[in-house]
Structures are given as structure tokens and as C-alpha cells.
Image (tube, grey):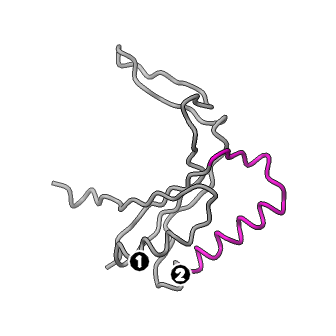
Amino acid sequence: MSDEYVLLIQEPNWNPDEMTAEQWQAGMAGHKVFQDAVAAAGERITASSALQAVTQATRITHGSDGEPVFTNGPFGETSEVVTGFYGFTASSPEQARELAALCPTHGWIELYPVLVLDAVR
């Protein structure tokens, strides 16, 4: 049985509006290699998406009165940005790491096993 993992892609200086068509094509080609490797391993991508620039993001915290406080990005203390993600399956943590290492980035990848909430008691 395969477990599910979430891969967070972190990039410095991410602004998709500033990318050329050639940069997009090269980036998508790298993601196709990752996607094909997951399929070749007999696993599957369960979710994926690129995210817009941090200038489009909103941070939501709760004030001392419990009411939500909304802050528009960019966030001054942010030096790296989550730029996209994948949800995918893997038969072992080792396989998940091997597959995640194929995901292209100019920054780094964070890999998390998904907590199966039905199993939490």
C-alpha cells in the first residue's frame, strides 16, 4: 500500500509574471520529468499547482480578541516563498525522497508525509 506525501517547492525571488516563455517551457519540462518518474514508479500525483507571487498572498492571524487579522503580502520577513506543491503517493519513505529529489527548483523542496486523520485516535 502506498502512503501519500506533500512536496512543497520553495524558491527565492519567485515572480511568475517576470518569467519568459522559454523559462516557463524549461521549468515545465523539468516538472514533466518528475511527473513521469512518479508514474513510472507505479505511483500517482494526487494534487499539484503552481502558486502566484507572494504579492498576491494573504496572511491570516487572530487578534487578541479572536477576530481574524488579514495582512496582504509581501511579508517583510519572508526570504523564501512556497511557489508550488505536489501531493503524490509512494510505497516507502525512501521512494518518496528519491522521487521528490527529481522535482526541479532553484531553491529547495520540503517533503512531508500526510497524516491520515482516520488513523488518529
The numbered mark at residue 95 is 1
- Most extreme residue toward the top is 65
Instruction: Write down the residue under mark 2.
Output: 39
* Numbered range of the magenta stretch: 12-37
Residue located at (31% from left, 79% from top): 1
Q: Is residue 71 magenta?
A: no
Q: Is residue 53 above or below residue 58?
A: below
Sequence order check: which comes first, mark 1 or mark 2? 2
| Quarter of the rendering containing residue 64 | top left
The numbered mark at residue 120 is none
Type of secondary structure dominating the magenta stretch:
helix
Q: Is residue 84 above or below residue 36?
A: above
User: In front: mark 1 or mark 2?
Assistant: 1
Pick whichever, 58 or 102, lies toward us: 102
* In this picture, residue 48 sits left or right of residue 118: right
- Separation of disc 1 and disc 2 at Cα? 12 Å
The picture places residue 88, in percent across and down from the top left corner, at 46, 68
The amino acid marked with disc number 1 is Gln
The amino acid marked with disc number 2 is Ala
Disc 1, disc 2: CB below 8 Å? no
Q: In which quarter of the image is the C terminus?
A: bottom left
User: SS for tag 1?
Assistant: helix
Q: In this view, does 109 lie above or below 16?
A: below
The picture places residue 12, in percent across and down from the top left corner, at 63, 47
Residue located at (58% from left, 44% from top): 81
* In this picture, residue 64 sits left or right of residue 81: left
Estimate how packed mark 2 is, as few (under 14), some (14 to 19) or many (20 or more) residues with alpha carbons within 10 Å: few
Pick whichever, 79 or 119, lies toward us: 79
| Quarter of the rendering containing residue 90 | bottom left
Q: Is residue 39 above or below residue 71?
A: below
